[in-house]
Image: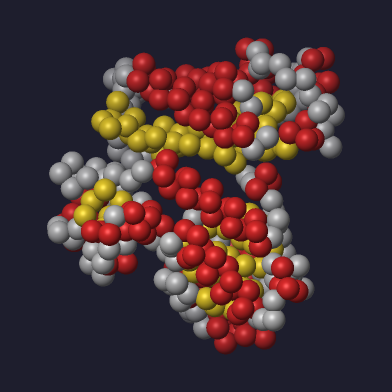
């Protein structure tokens, strides 16, 4: 049996601002935009702001309406990232097997760590105490035997919570929760389940595996397993993380190619920097575009070999931009609100010694593109094939 912890910081960005500026403590602090030029969305808000109905992902303009006396801050990602790195050092002091899922959240495999503590409560409190002592911030911790249960648990007593769900407690603590609490049950699935008369997680079991699969396909099988507390996912080290990426919202929507390309270039430099810091290479480049009307599209270029250099990322991103940022009927490319670049299919540099680091050429990109269209293996060159000895 594995012991898995899920640590989730409470109102992370807002809590950091309140920690660093006592004048903000006890006040509704809203991060993500300014009151007088209310654009963008709320990324985090303090618990004091939540009382007014403000929550993350809400447009700043709406938050201003709900909480006009709130303290609106643009946020300082550089600072938050630094705190996140300190947080990861704390995780590492408990276990070498931890998996950050976002800037303020991680899974920890505590199976070995637990042996040094007299109880899971003691271990959970030790993690929380260390975070509070070293960072001056509170975290909510869930401990269970699966990722899914640990994540639900960390949310149950937020903020500053500690919830332990052993398999024998699963039905009592998690079973009666609404289906939407399950990882992978989004709004739409929850609505469909509700129409089937299924409200709680335990209700899902009554439907039976067959009916879940015939209604939701493979996903139904996954949900059915989760409802029984079955979740085979293991905690994976950071380098097995699915992707590394960054995005930026323009101060003003723009259709100026120069502005867009410059932004992409900066994003690629940042992503390349982060890949290199972690010793990672990626085999797929994804471009994200959000137009002024909030329509978001993503476009992926799968390469024949991993890359990490800024030039390679830029070239790939640019190719995708040229192809997908298309003119409309009136001959104009739509104004963009946001662009993002991410790299996925990551490989650890230690497994990369077979590869010579040589920059991606135009021909590599074209091949990648053609292969994507016609399926892999259609077009290759000797040079590229020699890079496929990856196992
Ligand atoms: Mg959080």
Q: Quadrant of the C terminus?
A: top right
Across and down, in percent, residue 350 comes to 78, 35
Q: Residue at x 53, y 37 (%)?
A: 245
330 and 168: which one is in front?
A: 168
Across and down, in percent, residue 145 comes to 68, 73
**381 up-or-down from 81: above or below:** above
94 and 144: which one is in front?
A: 94
Q: Residue at x 65, y 13 (%)?
A: 361
Kindly give the residue lying farthest to the top in the view shown. Answer: 362
From the viewer's perspective, tell me whether residue 377 is left or right of residue 21.
right
Across and down, in percent, residue 289 comes to 42, 33
Is residue 327 among the parts visible in the rendering?
no
From the viewer's perspective, tell me whether residue 107 is left or right of residue 26.
right
Across and down, in percent, residue 3 comes to 70, 71
214 and 378: which one is in front?
A: 378
Q: Quadrant of the N terminus?
A: bottom right
**61 up-or-down from 385: above or below:** below
């Amino acid at each position: 049996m594995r012991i898995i912890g899920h640590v989730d910081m409470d109102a992370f960005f807002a809590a950091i601002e309140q920690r660093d500026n006592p004048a903000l403590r006890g006040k509704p602090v809203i991060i993500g935009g300014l009151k007088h030029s209310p654009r963008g969305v709320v990324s985090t808000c303090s618990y004091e702001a939540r009382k007014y109905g403000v929550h993350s992902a809400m447009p700043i303009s709406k938050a201003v309406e709900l909480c006009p006396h709130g303290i609106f801050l643009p946020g300082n990602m550089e600072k938050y990232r630094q705190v996140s790195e300190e947080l990861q050092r704390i995780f590492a002091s408990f276990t070498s097997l931890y998996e950050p899922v976002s800037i303020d959240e991680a899974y920890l495999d505590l199976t070995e760590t637990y042996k040094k503590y007299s109880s899971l409560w003691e271990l959970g409190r030790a993690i929380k105490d260390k975070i509070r002592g070293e960072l001056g911030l509170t975290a909510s911790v869930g401990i269970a035997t699966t990722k899914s249960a640990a994540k639900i648990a960390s949310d149950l007593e937020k903020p500053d919570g500690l919830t332990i769900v052993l398999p024998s407690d699963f039905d009592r603590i998690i079973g009666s929760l609404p289906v939407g609490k399950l990882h992978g049950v989004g709004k739409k699935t929850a609505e469909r389940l509700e129409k089937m008369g299924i409200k709680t997680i335990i209700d899902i079991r009554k439907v039976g595996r067959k009916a879940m699969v015939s209604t939701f396909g493979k996903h139904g099988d996954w949900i059915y397993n989760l409802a029984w507390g079955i979740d085979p996912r293991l905690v994976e080290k950071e380098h097995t993380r699915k992707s590394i990426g960054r995005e930026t919202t323009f101060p003003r929507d723009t259709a100026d190619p120069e502005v867009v390309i410059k932004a992409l270039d900066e994003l690629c430099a940042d992503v390349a920097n982060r890949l290199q810091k972690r010793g990672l290479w990626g085999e797929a480049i994804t471009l994200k575009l959000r137009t002024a009307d909030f329509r978001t599209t993503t476009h992926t270029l799968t390469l024949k070999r991993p890359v990490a250099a800024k030039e390679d990322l830029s070239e790939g991103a640019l190719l995708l931009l040229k192809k997908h940022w298309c003119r409309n009927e009136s001959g104009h490319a739509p104004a963009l609100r946001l662009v993002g670049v991410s790299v996925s299919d990551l490989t650890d540099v230690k497994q990369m010694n077979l590869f010579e680091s040589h920059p991606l050429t135009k021909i590599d990109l074209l091949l990648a593109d053609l292969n994507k269209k016609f399926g892999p293996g259609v077009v290759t060159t000797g040079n590229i094939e020699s890079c496929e000895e990856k196992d």
